Image (cartoon, rainbow, N blue to C red):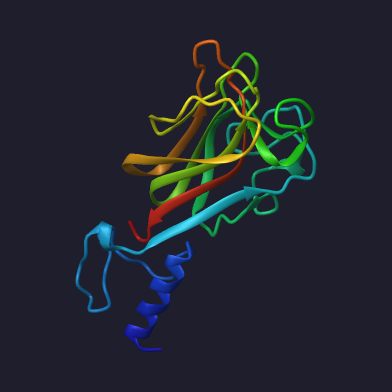
Amino acid sequence: MNKNKRGFAVLALCMLGGILALEITTSGFNLNNNFIVNADLPEGLSSVSFTLPGNNSVTYNQNGTHPTATYNLDDDTVVGNNGLITGYSGIDKVYPGNSTGGYGTSTTTLKFGSSSAVGTMTIAAKYSVHKVVINYATWSATKNSQLKVNGVMGQKVARLTFADETFDLSTPSTTVTIETTFPTSGDRRVGIVRIDLYHRCGA
């Protein structure tokens, strides 16, 4: 396969959120081997969802493992990663699924937060993420909950139905920290069913 065909194949894969098969610079490249700015790089998307064996009231460990190994955040439970996620850290008060209450029984959500503490998770990514879309429902139908992603505050909402919220990051980053907050007279808990991570391939 000649050089131009190889470059085209890599770009096509990257637009699907895949993994680049060859090393490139942080500034990117084009088919004529000229450097281009990050904004001109193709946009990749990893749409991450969860398939859990059940639900569990024990929180995840900081690195995404769980005392019950079948709940570990790995290729068996995390769908749509496409190789973008390289690890997890700082996880606190994040639980697999939901047994009862709030938005209902679920084996496809991560429950962030408890009645007394916020939930947080940091995702490490292979490429810099510039936009995050989170599909979630709140625990309470009347008390507001709120998400924060890399310091970008979300809306204060109270709804038991799942819906998207978009977070445009002011600075693209290879680490994405998702956390709940505690609005005045609010609730710290949400259930996240999907996390869309938008990145520039090679950046």
Q: What is the number of callouts on the image? A: 0
Q: Which residue is at 68% across, 28% downward?
A: 59
Near-viewer residue (60 or 41): 41
In-image side of 139 versus 128 (left or right)? right
Residue 31 horizontal side relative to residue 135, left or right: left
Tell me residue 182's x, y (percent): 52, 17
Image spot of residue 85 (x, y percent): 51, 50
Q: Residue at x 70, y 53 (%)?
A: 76
| Picture quadrant of residue 6 | bottom left
Above/below status of 200 relative to 149: below
Residue positioned 45% across, 49% down in the render: 125
Up-down: is 125 above or below 95? below
Q: Residue furthest top?
A: 185
Apparent side of residue 15 relative to residue 108 in the rendered image (left or right): left
Q: Residue at x 56, y 15 (%)?
A: 186
Q: Is residue 161 left or right of residue 87?
A: right
Nearer-the-camera pick, 137 or 75:
137
Q: Is residue 91 above or below residue 33?
A: above
| Image quadrant containing the N terminus | bottom left
Image coordinates for residue 101, horizontal then vertical, percent: 76, 25
- Quarter of the rendering occupied by the C terminus: bottom left
The answer to whether 153 is drawn above or below residue 65 in the figure is above
Q: Nearer the viewer, residue 94 or 67?
A: 94
> What x and y, as percent, mark residue 36?
21, 65
Which quarter of the figure has residue 8?
A: bottom left
Q: Residue furthest bottom?
A: 1
